[in-house]
Amino acid sequence: MNGHDVDERVKLLQEKKKLAMQGGGAEKLERHRQAGKLTARERVEYLLDPGTFREIHMFAETQCFEFDMQQKKILGDGVTTGYGKIGGRPVFVYSQDATVFGGSCGRAHGQKICNVIRLARKSGVPIVGLNDTGGGRLQEGMDNVAGYGETFFENTMTSGVVPQIAAIMGPCTGGGVYSPALMDFILQVEGTSQMFITGPVVVKEVMSQDVSFEELGGAKIHSTISGVAHFTAKNDRDCLELIKKLLSYLPQSNREKPPVRDMGDDPQRLCEKLTYFVPTDQKKTYDMRVVIKEVVDNGDFLEISPRYAQNMIIGFARLAGRSVGVVANQPRVFAGAIDINAADKGSRFIRFCDAFNIPIISFVDVPGYMPGVAQESGGIIRHGAKMLYAWSESTVPKITCIMRKAYGGSIPGMCCHEVGADQILVWPTAEMAMMGAESAVNILYGREIKASADPEAFRQEKTKYYRETFSTPYYSASKQLIDMVIEPKDTRRLVIDALLMLENKQIEGRPWKKHGVMPT
């Protein structure tokens, strides 16, 4: 082969690359930008460290011959795939291109996505999916189902091996929504993205209901009502920045610990603000987020699903530079009681942290599981059991801090020693018992109260005795049910001391099993 032949072939390669990078063409790309979106390739470039992206399968094409698809095929088949770095750490990525067949998934499209998911799993690095798809490609018939089905399998095999993050940056419909649903976290862009199985036209035809795209599957719906979206973002760039922040808390795979970062916040810093922050009066409320931010490094807390099941707070923070998962009750909502949605939210997060070696800190102020006909008929028993299952199954360091109250079944629901807590720290203001003193006295002394000459005085006397005898942290401490009674101002330094002490925790004596069966 002479030099001229080489030059011609290199020129052909360059032309094909240029053609592949045009996606659906300049006009469609510009319309995409006019809608306030970045293009598929612009999203990848913004997400990854400059100059690190290496594209895979740029020249893949549909193999479909029906509906004149061979004359319509486009290099890359509507999805950009490859690998690069975020903050200097390797990551695999795919980005669907809505300018090519509406971002629809055919077999070649699906195979490209499956390939990078497999490579991420084999390489032990996270996978990030930037979704913008009209669903399955009708022209390819059952082949698009094969493309989706294989993707679902790869997502499932990768679950718990490397972090999987899905960003919804445009429509994500039909079968296209199930791959993100199988991933660990979903971010959704406000105003320009929707998720739904069946669109407004089908809903109108089948259910006779008029509904808009936003009402059916917009970011507000999925971040507040369905709980499908864990984060929302104002625009594409905001979404991509959020992905970078999320990844900073996570390890590359289940074989590693999260990275340690010096945050410049003294591990022995006292939290003087907490001394009087939490009201001793059980009927008064406060914002648990203030407690969390006072304790963690630099007050930096990445809350997950902040607008869904708001009686349960979950998210990532750092203590002494170590990533931790936070699970906390929110007294401002339902007094912090655990309902169906809160149990689902908390238990899934506990299992994620356990899968990826992230210690868990629980901040407890909980009156119990939510009572009522709606909760019982909705299955609070099986949903609430998920919390117990998740705590018991997890093997990462678990530190519990009880501040004001912990009653009944919600005590193990927020992690006590019996379900796996390694250290339990309790404020002197806390009450712990099977139920609150007033309710307990009404049950224990019901007849005596009625027979008393002064029922109210008798009730108050017994309530005071019950509270001061059985509900105090010292009663639990005397039975070694808790490890320390601490001053509120010492919460940060003592939680960090426990965390560092447990850093190399080992688990012994668990039975062999293929896997357990978690309550549904």
Image (tube, rainbow, N blue to C red):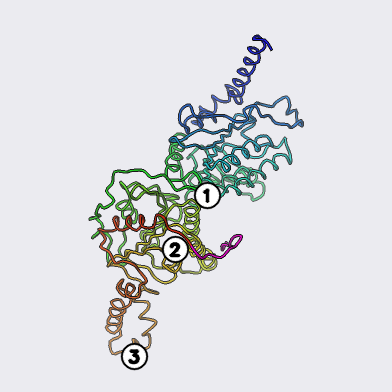
For the image, the number of numbered tags is 3
**Horizontal and vertical percent position of residue 449:** 33, 86
Say which quarter of the image contains residue 499: bottom left
Range shown magenta: 508-520
Q: Is residue 2 above or below residue 407?
A: above
Residue appearing at x 48%, y 39% in the figure: 189
Residue with the mark numbered 3 = 451
Q: Secondary structure at mark 3?
A: helix
Of the pair 514 and 168, the residue shown nearer to us: 514
Classed neighbour count for the residue bearing mark 2: other residues with Cα under 10 Å, few (<14), some (14–19), many (≥20) = many
- Is residue 44 at all visible to an observer of this figure? yes
Q: Main secondary structure of the magenta part?
A: loop
**Horizontal and vertical percent position of residue 253:** 51, 46
Residue with the mark numbered 1 = 228
State the separation of the CA atoms marked 3 and 2: 36 Å
Residue appearing at x 29%, y 85% in the figure: 458
Residue with the mark numbered 2 = 338
Q: Is residue 263 above or below residue 507?
A: above
**Mark 1 or 3, closer to the camera:** 1
Label 3–label 2 contact, CB within 8 A:
no
